[in-house]
Image (cartoon, grey):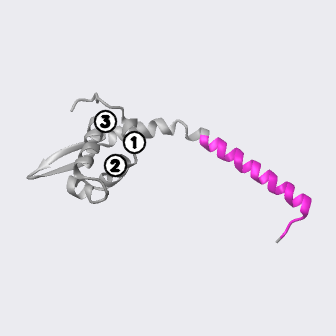
Amino acid sequence: MTSEYRRDVFQAIADPTRRKIIDLISQQPMNLKTIAEYFDISRPAISQQIKILIECGLVEVKRVGRETYCTIQPGELKKIADWAGQYAGLWEDRIDSFEKYVNKLHTKKNKKYGKFK
């Protein structure tokens, strides 16, 4: 498959079933039957989800004998991590601000009511 995919990688992670498939095959390559055992949906439905992951460039399918194995393609996952990572500082700042606010409230409460142990 070429480096240009028909679907956006973020479309792949928008669906919880596809995220679970990514989680499963990130540990080791799996065949379709094994993947399907983790879900309460049909094998054709799993195949459709795999097809979307292939179109997004997150999964590669290889035939080994009569079996079809799905393998994760980490390069596309890195794009997601890189995009989300640019917001890490923003969330850290917000969490730090919230922590300071809670500590300030706690200090006010202790001053008003005395410290309890």
What's the residue type where badge 2 is placed? Ile
Quadrant in which residue 30 is drawn: bottom left
Q: Is residue 67 a member of the stretch shown in magenta?
A: no
Q: Position of residue 60 (x, y in %)?
A: 23, 42
Q: Is residue 106 a member of the stretch shown in magenta?
A: yes
What's the residue type where badge 1 is placed? Ile
- Left of 25 or right of it: where is 114? right
Task: Give me the C-alpha separation between circle 1 and circle 2.
Answer: 9 Å
Label pair 3/1, CB-CB below 8 angstroms: no
What span is in magenta?
Answer: 91-116
Identity of the residue drawn at 62% across and 44% down = 92
Location of the C terminus (image quadrant): bottom right
Pick out the residue farthest to the bottom: 117
Task: Give me the C-alpha separation between circle 2 and circle 3.
Answer: 12 Å
Identity of the residue drawn at 29% across and 53% down = 41
Q: Nearer the viewer, residue 51 or 62?
A: 51
What's the residue type where badge 3 is placed? Cys
